[in-house]
Image (spheres, helix red, strand yellow):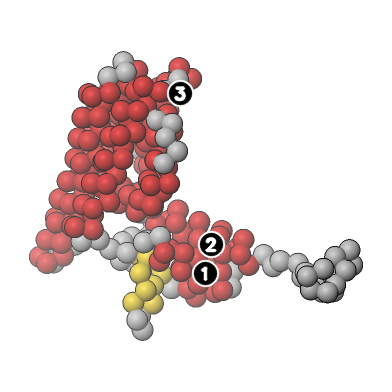
Amino acid sequence: MLNGKDPKSPLVQKLEPLTETPQLGTRVYQALVNSIVSGQIELGAPLRPDTIARQLEVSTTPVREAMHRLEGDGLAIKVPYQGWFVREYNEQQVREPYELRAALECFSVRLACRRITAEEMTWLRQHQATGEAALAAGDMDAYRIYNRDLHAAIMKAARNSCLFPMMGQLRLQTEMLMAKTIRIIGRPLRAIEEHHQLIELIDQRDGRAAERLMEHHILSALEDIVRWGQKTEGQVRDGNA
């Protein structure tokens, strides 16, 4: 009885039920994340809490909570006296996460070549077929999800518990940028062929070749994004956008 009260006595004050606001804020956050990383909300677009609240039929409180989370994740920025905007990236800000992602995914595919199970290999092949079907149908949202899940499965097969937390810091930003690469003519076809080759190399347990291909796969996507950004900036300057 450090506080002088009988430990067996009931609590003097009852706890009040929790409100649904935190859960609602999480749902608003997830809705915004999905729209941003899929490219439905463009880079640089304003994020107006009143408009978002009206569209989602919620109050502005959970929307503002979601905005702060987006800002913490590096997906949004708050400009004084102007409000929140989807983050835009200069070339260096694009290169840095992709270079780190390349290092992490090269390491993960090398480990996956040693540790992947037969069941996981079967899943990769089945999932590759899903991605090919999505691309053939022109369903780019399904293709984006296929791409995300395939890379995550390879990382999971590496069986290194440190990889996912490190990749988690990059995941949302690279997904948002990846939404741009799938719009680049020819990129999805090249990417899905590289995925096919990666799966074959993993099945052959050829870690060195798989690592080289993964590096090419990630860094070529980086260069496509950089070129796309430069082209877009040029169009804006010339009045063609």
Where residue 194 sits, quadrant-wise, is top left
Toward the viewer: 28 or 1? Answer: 1
| Label ID, residue 65 | 1
Residue 193 drawn at (x, y percent): 26, 27
Query: Quick one: 41 or 159, which is closer to the camera?
Result: 159
Element carrying mark 1: helix
Q: Quadrant of the C terminus?
A: bottom left
Q: Residues within 10 Å of mark 2 (few under 14, many from 20)?
A: many
- For label 2, the SS is helix
Q: CA distance from mark 1 to mark 3?
A: 38 Å
Q: Is residue 83 visible?
A: yes
**Residue 28 bears which disc, if any?**
2
The correct choice, above or below, for 80 with respect to 10 in the image is: below
Q: Is residue 130 left or right of residue 216?
A: right
Give me the disc on residue 56: none
Of labels 2 and 3, earlier in sequence is 2
**Relative to residue 20, is residue 91 drawn left or right?**
left
Residue bearing mark 3: 120
Name the residue type under label 3: Glu
Left or right of 11: which side holds 137? left
Residue type, label 1 = Glu
Marks 1 and 2, how far apart at CA: 9 Å
